[in-house]
């Protein structure tokens, strides 16, 4: 059965403009069908984050088994030991109706298997919880090959700053002033559903989702990242 699944995901991979290659980097994203909300409350975000962590393996997972029968908390799930990873995650952001991931594929077919586990697992959870049927996402997840350094740097900024859309609509086209920059960075620091706080050095369990060492070493320390964000916002 596993061999059949691998064959299916590899066939789908071949149809993409940029087929997934082990060792290469990709921007992955998707949104709710008809732009519907896919994260309604804190528990929904946490469910998806547990999938980001646990689905990143060839092992079979059951979050319901862990959280219901074994009564493990969100924080306890995100410290469970994993043998290997299908992908390395460099940056992520969850928004009410969509998500963004920056990943590196670590084994052949890794991205396809990872995203299938996430998409199926979260859709089943959401549909049962909210008593709905049908597709949750607007088609297969989208992907773009990260084929140069400038695009990689852009994604580290764009994905970590994506939550600004919530409070600062059209923020990418705004001329930045110091007072606005300060308000944006304070909002980003408080927004818990992205990797932004992890690169600032916040001590939280979600940092286990990312593997910075698998990506170019742009940020020597927390201050280097903060300076990068300042430059991204003011030089865009």
Image (tube, rainbow, N blue to C red):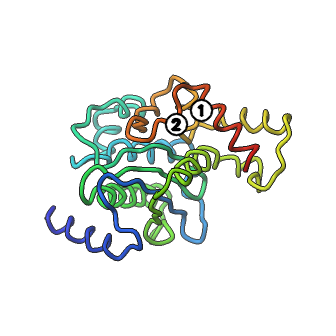
Query: Residue at the location (45% across, 43% down)?
Result: 90
In percent of width and height, residue 164 lies at 70, 47
Image position of 59 with respect to 141: above or below? above
- Residue 218 - label: 2
In percent of width and height, residue 75 lies at 42, 29
Query: Residue at the location (60% across, 53% down)?
Result: 96
Q: Is residue 185 left or right of residue 192?
A: right
In percent of width and height, residue 177 lies at 86, 40
Q: Based on the displayed image, in which of its 4 quarters is residue 54 positioned?
A: top left
Of 52 and 174, the residue lying toward us: 174
Image position of 134 with respect to 105: above or below? below
- SS for tag 1? helix
**Residue that mark 1 sits on:** 225
| C-alpha gap between disc 2 and disc 1 | 8 Å
Q: Based on the displayed image, in which of its 4 quarters is residue 181 positioned?
A: top right
Give the total of numbered labels: 2
């Amino acid at each position: 059965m596993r061999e059949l699944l691998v064959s299916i995901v590899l066939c789908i991979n071949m149809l993409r403009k940029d087929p997934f290659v082990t060792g290469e980097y990709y921007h992955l994203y998707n949104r709710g069908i008809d732009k519907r909300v896919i994260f309604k409350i804190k528990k929904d975000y946490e469910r998806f984050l547990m999938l980001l962590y646990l689905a990143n393996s060839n092992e079979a997972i059951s979050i319901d088994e862990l959280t219901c029968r074994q009564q493990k908390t969100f924080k306890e799930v995100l410290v469970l030991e994993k043998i290997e990873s299908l992908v390395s995650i460099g940056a992520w952001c969850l928004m009410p109706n969509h998500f963004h991931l920056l990943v590196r594929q670590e084994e052949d077919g890794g991205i396809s298997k990872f995203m299938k586990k996430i998409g199926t697992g979260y859709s089943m959870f959401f549909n049962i919880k909210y008593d709905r049927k049908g597709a949750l996402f607007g088609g297969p997840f989208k992907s773009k090959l990260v084929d140069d350094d400038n695009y990689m740097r852009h994604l580290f900024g764009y994905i970590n700053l994506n939550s600004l859309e919530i409070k600062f609509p059209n923020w990418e086209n705004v001329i930045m002033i110091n007072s606005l920059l300060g308000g944006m960075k304070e909002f980003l620091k408080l927004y818990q559903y992205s990797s932004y706080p992890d690169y600032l050095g916040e001590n939280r369990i979600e940092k286990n989702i990312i593997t910075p060492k698998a990506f170019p070493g742009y940020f020597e320390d927390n201050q280097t990242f903060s300076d990068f964000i300042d430059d991204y916002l003011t030089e865009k």
